[in-house]
Image: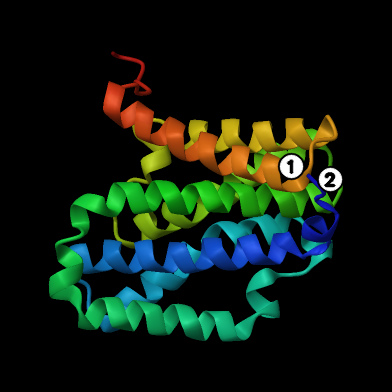
Amino acid sequence: MDFGVITAVDWSTIFDYLAVIIGAITGALFAVARKLDIVGTIAIAIITAYGGGVIRDMLLHSHGFFFMQHPLLIVACGIIAAIVFVFSRSARKLENGLFYADALSMSWFALAGTIKCWNAEVGIVLAIVLGTVTAVGGGALRDICTGETPVIFKPGGFYAISAFIGAAVFVGCMALGAPLIPASIACVVITFALTLLSKHFGWRTKHKGE
């Protein structure tokens, strides 16, 4: 299959857009489930959507801030959060699906973060590490802002581990000369699948006393 035309598209920006939008939805659902007001819902949605990317871009300092470069996307996130809040009664019914939405959001962020770092030519190790940071950063900041211990720091199912493996798979594929699209699909699918499988089979990290 000829990937020439496909790879000519700015997939890094497209994946960032998708990740941010999904992150805003999951952040708003998270806020609604905790009965925050509309200001809190919008704030948490934006923090979830942009947190990991802002941390990544701060560490990449010379490659620009995605947050600053696409202001209309911030408005879109605010509108999405407001819609979720207005229909909060229906949104609360989706709380049980928040885990799956969060897993999907993290998977897209893992890809968006890793591909930007790969394109920035920061090296294999930093691409994987910053891809993982992008995936879990927004969720961690969201948890901190609502007074909860971030999921990535608590014993439980795979979260950061899934993002790390997904980022490593993407970088490995690209380093071996694989086309961008298959490498991207592999990253998202593996990250999402590992997160779901850890929940289904009870795979979990443990604290030292266990």
Q: Which quadrant of the figure has residue 204?
A: top left
Q: Is residue 148 above or below residue 175?
A: below
Query: Residue 25 at what x, y percent from top left?
Result: 38, 67
Query: Residue 136 at what x, y percent from top left?
Result: 50, 47
Locate the C terminus and report the quarter of the image it occupies: top left
Q: Residues within 10 Å of mark 1 (few under 14, many from 20)?
A: many
Q: Is residue 199 left or right of residue 139?
A: left
Q: Is residue 43 left or right of residue 185?
A: left
Residue 122, which numbered label? 2
- Between 20 and 46, the residue placed more toward the observer is 20
Residues at badges 2 and 1 in contact (C-beta under 8 Å)?
A: yes
Q: Residue at x 84, y 45 (%)?
A: 122
Could you tell me which secondary element the residue under label 1 belongs to?
helix
Distance of label 2 from label 1 (alpha carbons): 6 Å
Locate the N terminus and report the quarter of the image it occupies: top right
Q: Residues within 10 Å of mark 2 (few under 14, many from 20)?
A: some
Residue 127, which numbered label? 1
Which residue type carries mark 2?
A: Val
- Between 195 and 126, the residue placed more toward the observer is 195
- Between 194 and 143, the residue placed more toward the observer is 194
Q: Which quadrant of the figure has residue 168?
A: top right
Q: Is residue 94 above or below residue 100?
A: below
Q: Is residue 196 visible?
A: yes
Q: Residue at x 32, y 69 (%)?
A: 28
Query: Residue 73 at what x, y percent from top left?
Result: 56, 80
Q: Residue at x 72, y 60 (%)?
A: 11
- Of the two numbered discs 2 and 1 on the same chain, state the one appearing first in sequence: 2
Q: Is residue 167 above or below residue 203?
A: below
Could you tell me which secondary element the residue under label 2 belongs to?
loop
Which color mode does the image show?
Answer: rainbow
Q: Residue at x 66, y 55 (%)?
A: 56
